[in-house]
Amino acid sequence: MNVNEQLTDLERIELTKKSYDELKLGEEIVIGNHHIGIVCRKVHAEDGMRAFIISNPHEVTILFKGSYGIKRGNPQTWRDEWLKTNLPILRAMLSHERRVPSQLKSASKLLNETISQFKGKQIYIYGHSLGAINAQFALANCHHPEAIGAAYLYEGTNIWLLFTPKERRRVALMREKIFNYVDIYDPVTLGITETHHMVGKLCYVDSEPMKPIKQHMWGGYLFNPDGSVKLREIDQAFLAEARSEHKLLTRSGDLTEFIEKISSADEIKKMATEKIDRMVEHYPDHSSLAKLATLFKSELLKDRD
């Protein structure tokens, strides 16, 4: 059995967190008592897409890195991760336009290159936040779905609306191999659904509300004694959240106009507080817009806890 198959949910999250570290080439990655492999490639694409490739004699692990907060990052990471990637994705979803940021394409290229480089080995994919978004698009454009051992995605926006019919069919082939973890109180998990209109199988996390950044960084996750994540069945809270977000994402509004015009933290503060607050008052589906407001005011302006 491949080592990735032996990890508990808790250990897989610890492995995913490694994507935020500055891993070095040749570094040995060990989680618990499991030797994941050696870092054989670290990727920092021109568009800001970052990932690590870890290999052992039997399998390959890809860690797609998520976003830093503005305070944690620098002008380049802010530009690459937010202005050029996260915010355009949100704008495209709200305006029903297929506009794919460069980072997603770079992630897709990396996955296919890795499959070609390590022919015959199973590929295991991990991603959190922006890393989960990049992983979703990479999987949707994977040339060899049979090479995917499994994928574990955490707290990423559901980008199903941006996929072509061909991409949707491709991820459908791998649905049983992809585990998509969603905490409904996390403001980044926009577009959640109880249907198959998502990448992989929904893993609905049993969580409670807390500070947004802590929530986003797995703060609401609880674990069973065996290390598995506590999940819950689809309930009314989930369905209400999904319906509210579906309403928002199927409505074209002036929320989309300002997203790509932001050029400084001061402008973000001013525009987010004024524009989003006005729209929260204007539209009846307060819960989904309130979720967006939390995303802009907290995730963009603060570092993760």
Image (cartoon, rainbow, N blue to C red):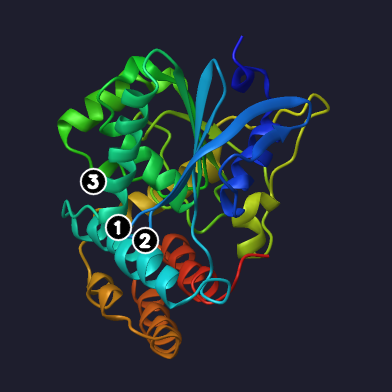
- The structure residue drawn at horizontal position 56% and vertical position 77%, both measured from the top left corner, is 71
Amino acid type of disc 3? Leu
Mark 2: secondary structure = helix
The residue lying toward the viewer, choosing from 166 and 108, is 108
Observer-side mark, 2 or 3, equals 2
> Which mark, residue 86?
2
Upstream in the sequence, badge 2 or badge 3?
Answer: 2
Residue tagged by mark 3?
A: 162
Residue tagged by mark 1?
A: 89
Contact between marks 1 and 2 (CB within 8 A): the answer is yes
Amino acid type of disc 1? Ile
Q: Is residue 206 visible?
A: no
Would you identify the image quadrant in which residue 158 lies?
Answer: top left
Distance from label 2 to label 3 (Cα)? 13 Å
Amino acid type of disc 2? Asn
- The structure residue drawn at horizontal position 28% and vertical position 63%, both measured from the top left corner, is 88
Residue 251: x, y in percent?
23, 59
> Which mark, residue 34?
none
Distance from label 1 to label 2 (Cα)? 5 Å
Residue 247 appears left or right of 68: left
The residue lying toward the viewer, choosing from 209 and 174, is 174
For mark 3, does the 10 Å Cα neighbourhood hold few (<14), some (14 to 19), or many (20 or more) residues? some
Residue 42: x, y in percent?
47, 46
- The structure residue drawn at horizontal position 69% and vertical position 49%, both measured from the top left corner, is 220
Distance from label 1 to label 3 (Cα)? 8 Å
For mark 2, does the 10 Å Cα neighbourhood hold few (<14), some (14 to 19), or many (20 or more) residues? many
Residue 227 appears left or right of 274: right
Q: Is residue 228 above or below residue 206?
A: above
The residue lying toward the viewer, choosing from 266 and 142, is 142
- The structure residue drawn at horizontal position 31% and vertical position 32%, both measured from the top left corner, is 113
